[in-house]
């Protein structure tokens, strides 16, 4: 028997954590991320082309001076909904990435990379162009775009899973290649729809397609929030199952996980979170792959902590990226997709380099 | 008692198992042996509900297919042949996955105990993916052990299903793991193991089921099942069973095939 130099159970740290047990570290990380998120949120409210700041609000509260109408509009009707949308979208992108990676048992699965976002985008475009002509289109009102995006994302996730998983094993190569094909197909169909669109719809599509939080309104927040909150609420119930699934489908079943049901819920969760995010923000890439990867390095892959931490870090990262996109060429704005891709692209290549030997292509 | 009656399994178009009857008693180590492709692993996969089967399997009187996954998970654990992990879990975290099957919390102390039992004490902080094949196999065994730690729960036996538990181990650890399975059975639990090593089978198994071409040739104590004729027929080569006089233990000598 090989003998380790470390004692069997204890490592000399202040919490007397057991070697290999990273739960304390994960919990500490959660507190750190909550503080980071609070800081970034306050900064997000403060930063912008107009001069309004939280300082003004506080000064107004403690003096007789009224907050000016401009400041009120800037803070309450422009920056606050934008912050809310950033938090929701960031959290849902990161969580859908983490759930998808757990489901596919692969750290490279990401809704943006494997055609799920493209499918959701197609759904959104269908809703924008055909809108009220769709069955239920009238009844759904504001929700028609997020719901259509969810359906598009759901169908593409289902197809992708069917194609790339056989006998409980997922092939990375097949998954990525099928994702390329699905993305191309969704792109082509979207192109046809854009061709059919009238001028007003084209304007909507262009704004939507920029991949941006610009034009955030409370109405948009309200349209996306139910789906995103539902998906975020479902995620914690998947945590134990996703942990077990890391051992493979058969072993997960032996551990008492109802595997088929759990997979269906995971696919719905990914589609709901991705669809709603895509519907209100276009395609914002790389959050879903960067955030879970960083957290796995920091606190390990246990989904009971990974999912919550991913929601927090994703929200903080997106609000931070939005701040950069608003201030770097102020008063103009850089689409946030450009910011996340500039940071995320090189990061993704770094992940690939690190994992080259491990990938079973 | 685990009882399988008239089990048939078809994979693709091939009938891998047909008309198989199999029994395992609590308090015993039951081995499934047979040549490659005889259906050993498929039989174990039917017994653990991994493949669809015809016929009936009951565990302590209850139809396996009627039991909820989590109820079953509290009563039996399954060790696969090899496990590839998708993410960088530590050894501690892998073993703790075995605890997630149970309902009662606060059993974390079992993790170091189980690791010590499989000779992996001190490995808790290491990354699973960085271990050797044999070490990974023993960590998986620790995970399986914590899932059904008590061999008997409220008068009902717990069960271990092991698919070639010693295949990637050195001889010392082979004995250690077989001893562990043996004492689990002696404490009242049931153990069913697919075995390649006939010598270890003869040393440790209370009951041996020999498969050949998807059928059970014979099930019983090893002296009845592991005979010259049966082994030679099943494995397609001449084998002779011998015993060492002082202890009377059975051993299999492949060299005798060369002699006339």
Image: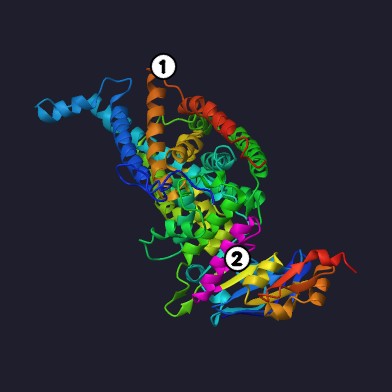
Label 2 element class:
strand
Q: Name the one closer to the observer, B69 or A118.
A: B69
Asked if both marks, 1 and 2, belong to the same chain, the answer given is no
Crowd around label 1: few <14 · some 14–19 · many ≥20 (10 Å): few
Task: Determine which quarter of the picture holds residue B80.
Answer: bottom right
Farthest front residue? B246
Q: Which residue is mark 1?
A: A329
Is residue B142 left or right of B193 when viewed as pictured? left
Q: Residue furthest left?
A: A64
Q: Position of residue A269 (x, y in %)?
A: 48, 50
Quarter of the image where the N terminus of chain B is located: bottom right
The percent coordinates of residue B131 (x first, y second) are 56, 46
Determine the residue positioned at 82% across, 72% down: B232
Within the image, what quadrant is residue A190 found in?
top right
In 3D space, how far apart are the residues under numbered discs 1 and 2 (Cα atoms)?
63 Å
- Which residues lie in the magenta part? B161-190
Residue identifier under label 2: B162
Residue B14 is a magenta residue = no
- The circle drawn on residue A130 is none
Secondary element under disc 1, as helix, strand or loop, is loop
Residue under the point 60% across and 63% down: B175
């Amino acid at each position: 028997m090989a003998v380790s130099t470390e004692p069997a159970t204890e490592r000399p740290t202040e919490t007397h954590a057991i070697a290999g047990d990273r739960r304390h570290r994960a919990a500490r990380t959660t507190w750190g991320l909550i503080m980071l998120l609070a800081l970034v949120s306050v900064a997000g409210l403060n930063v912008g082309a107009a001069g309004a700041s939280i300082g003004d609000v506080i000064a107004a509260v403690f003096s007789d001076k009224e907050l000016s109408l401009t400041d009120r509009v800037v803070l309450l009707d422009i920056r606050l909904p934008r912050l809310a949308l950033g938090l929701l979208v960031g959290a849902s992108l990161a969580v859908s990435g983490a759930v998808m990676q757990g489901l596919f048992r692969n750290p490279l699965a990401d809704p943006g990379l494997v055609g799920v976002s493209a499918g959701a985008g197609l759904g959104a475009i269908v809703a924008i162009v055909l809108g009220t002509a769709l069955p239920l289109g009238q009844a759904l009102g504001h929700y028609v775009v997020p719901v259509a995006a969810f359906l598009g994302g759901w169908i593409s996730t289902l197809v992708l899973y069917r194609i790339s998983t056989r006998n409980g094993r997922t092939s990375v190569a097949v998954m990525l290649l099928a994702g390329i094909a699905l993305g191309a197909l969704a792109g082509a169909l979207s192109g046809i729809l854009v061709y059919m669109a009238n001028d007003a719809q084209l304007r909507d599509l262009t704004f939507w397609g920029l991949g941006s939080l610009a034009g955030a309104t409370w109405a948009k927040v309200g349209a996306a929030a139910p789906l995103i909150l539902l998906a975020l609420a479902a995620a914690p119930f998947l945590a134990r199952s996703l942990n077990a699934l890391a051992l493979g489908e058969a072993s997960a079943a032996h551990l008492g996980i109802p595997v088929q049901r759990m997979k269906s819920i995971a696919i719905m969760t990914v589609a709901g979170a991705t669809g709603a995010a895509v519907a209100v923000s276009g395609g914002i890439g790389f959050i879903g792959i960067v955030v879970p990867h960083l957290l796995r390095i920091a606190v390990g892959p246990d989904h009971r902590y990974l999912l919550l931490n991913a929601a927090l870090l994703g929200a903080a990262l997106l609000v931070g990226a939005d701040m950069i996109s608003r201030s770097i060429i102020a008063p103009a704005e850089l689409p946030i997709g450009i910011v996340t891709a500039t940071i995320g692209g090189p990061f993704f290549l770094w992940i690939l380099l690190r994992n080259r030997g491990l990938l079973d292509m | 008692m685990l009882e399988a009656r008239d089990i048939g399994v078809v994979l693709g178009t091939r009938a891998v198992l047909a008309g198989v009857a199999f029994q395992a008693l609590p308090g015993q180590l039951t081995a499934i042996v047979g040549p490659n492709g005889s259906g050993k692993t498929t039989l174990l996969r039917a017994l653990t509900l991994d493949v669809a089967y015809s016929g009936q399997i009951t565990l302590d009187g209850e139809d396996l297919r009627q039991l909820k996954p989590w109820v079953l998970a509290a009563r039996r654990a399954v060790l696969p042949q090899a496990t590839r992990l998708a993410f960088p879990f530590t050894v501690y975290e892998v073993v703790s996955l075995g605890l997630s099957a149970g309902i009662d919390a606060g059993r974390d102390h079992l993790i170091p105990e189980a690791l010590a039992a499989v000779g992996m004490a001190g490995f808790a902080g290491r990354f699973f993916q960085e271990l050797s094949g044999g070490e990974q196999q023993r960590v998986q065994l620790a995970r399986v052990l914590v899932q059904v730690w008590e061999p008997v729960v409220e008068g009902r036996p717990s069960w271990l299903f092991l698919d070639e538990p010693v295949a990637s181990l050195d001889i010392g650890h082979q004995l250690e793991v077989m001893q562990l399975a043996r004492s689990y059975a002696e404490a009242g639990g049931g153990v069913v193991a697919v075995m390649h090593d006939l010598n270890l089978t003869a040393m440790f198994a209370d009951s041996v089921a020999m498969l050949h071409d998807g059928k059970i040739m014979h099930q019983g104590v090893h002296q009845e099942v592991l005979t010259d004729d049966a082994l030679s027929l099943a494995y397609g080569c001449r084998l002779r069973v011998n015993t060492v006089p002082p202890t009377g233990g059975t051993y299999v000598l492949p060299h005798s095939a060369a002699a006339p």
